[in-house]
Amino acid sequence: MKIPSAISAMLAGIGLTLISLWYGQNHGLMPIAASEEAPWVDGLFNTMMTIATGLFVLVQGIIIVAIWRFRQRPGDDSDGPPIHGNVPLEVLWTAIPAVLIMGIGIYSFEVYNSMGGLDPMASHDSHTMQAQAQPGAAIAATLPENEPEADATPSKAKKMLALGVGASPKTQGQSPFVNVNVLGLQFAWIFTYPDLGITSGELHMPAGKEVQLTISANDVIHALWIPEFRLKQDAIPGRETELRFVPQTVGNYPLLCAELCGSYHGGMKTRAIVHTPEDYQAWVESQLAAQPESGNTVAINPAELSESDYLEPLGAEMGITPEAIAQLHN
Ligand SMILES: [Cu+2]
C-alpha cells in the first residue's frame, strides 16, 4: 500500500515537532540554575535549542531522503532537469527565518530588559572617578564643566554610560542588599565589601538577597563569569561595569575569567558561594573578627629587592649572615 505523500509529510512534520520540543527541554547542556535571573536565560536558550533542533533534523532529513530518492539508477546517464530558481520557495525560506529571528530578537530583548540590562543611564557619579585617575582613559573622561547652560541634560551628559546588568524594572530605585567591588587583575579576582570593610578572594553572598557587583580591572580586560547564574560581564581597565542579580540556590559555584587575559588566564578562577542568610551573617562576623585592628600591613614586592635583601630576613632565621648570602649570589 502506498501512503499519499501529503500524509507522510504531515507525519514527518509531527515527528519533527515532537523531537524538537523534547530535545529543547532535555538537552542537558546547562549547569544548575542558581540565580533568580537564570530561568529567563534558560527559557531563551531552550527556545533557540528547539528551533535549532527542528532545523537540523529537517535539513539533514531532506538531505538523506534526497540522496536515496534521487540517486543514479543503473544505466541512467541523463542530466538532471535544469531548474532556475523557484520564487514561491525562495519567498518561503526567506520569510520563515525572518519571522524566527524577529521572534528570538524580541524575546531576548524582553529577557535582557527584565534582568536590568536596559538601564544604561543609571550610572553612579563615582563611576567617573577611576577613569579620571588613569591617564590612559581619555576616552572615558567627563565633559568639561563649562558646557552651555542650554544643554537640557547637563548632569546626564557628565555621567558615564553604565555597562552591564543594572537594576531591573522591578528593583528600580531600591538599593541592593550587598555591594561588592570586584577587581580583576592578572591573574586573580579580589572582592571588596565597601560597606563591611571586608576583602576576600571568594565571592560570598546570601541567598535570596539582591547583590550589586561593581566591576573594574587593573591591567587588561577580564570577564567575570558565573555559569550557574547565567551572568557574564567584562571587567575593563579605566571604567566600571556592573552586575545586579539575586543568587538563589545555596552552594559553591565556579567563578571564572572568560576573557583571554594572559599566560595564566586559565588559572584565574575562584568560587562564588551562596550562603543561607544566617551562614552569610556568620561569614561576615568571622571576616570582621579576622581583620587586623590597624590596617597597617605593608606588602613587599620581591621584584624590587635585590636577592640578598630578599633573603636576609629568611637567612637570619636560619642563622646565616648577610655576608654569606652575598657570597652565594655573587
Ligand atoms: Cu582574566
Image (cartoon, grey):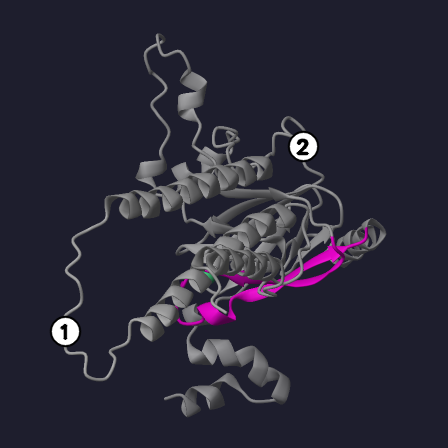
Query: In the displayed image of the protein, which residue is found farthest to the right?
Result: 278
The residues bearing labels 2 and 1 have C-alpha atoms spaced at a distance of 76 Å
Q: Position of residue 231 (x, y in %)?
A: 56, 51
Give yes or no for contact between labels 2 and 1 (Cβ–Cβ under 8 Å): no
Q: Is residue 251 left or right of residue 327?
A: right
Residue beneath the point at 43% across and 92% down: 328
In the foreground, 301 or 26 = 26
Above or below residue 239? Residue 297 is: below
Q: Amino acid at mark 1?
A: Ser
- Under 8 Å from ligand 1: the CB of mark 1? no
The residue that mark 1 highlights is: 78
Q: Is residue 286 left or right of residue 191?
A: right
Is there any visible trace of residue 239 in the rendered image?
no
Query: In the displayed image of the protein, which residue is found farthest to the front?
Result: 1
The magenta segment is 249-276
Quadrant where the image shows the C terminus:
bottom left
Confirm whether the magenta stretch covers residue 153. no
The residue that mark 2 highlights is: 175
Q: Secondary structure at mark 1?
A: loop
In the foreground, 215 or 12 = 12
Disc 2 versus disc 1: nearer the observer: 1
Displayed quadrant of residue 65? bottom left
Q: Amino acid at mark 2?
A: Ser
Circle 2 Cα neighbour tier, 10 Å, few/some/many (<14 / 14–19 / ≥20): few
Is there any visible trace of residue 81 in the rendered image?
yes
Q: Position of residue 329 (x, y in %)?
A: 40, 88
Residue beneath the point at 44% across and 80% down: 307
Above or below residue 66? Residue 200 is: above
Circle 1 Cα neighbour tier, 10 Å, few/some/many (<14 / 14–19 / ≥20): few
In the foreground, 145 or 53 = 53
Disc 2 or 1, which lies upstream in sequence? 1
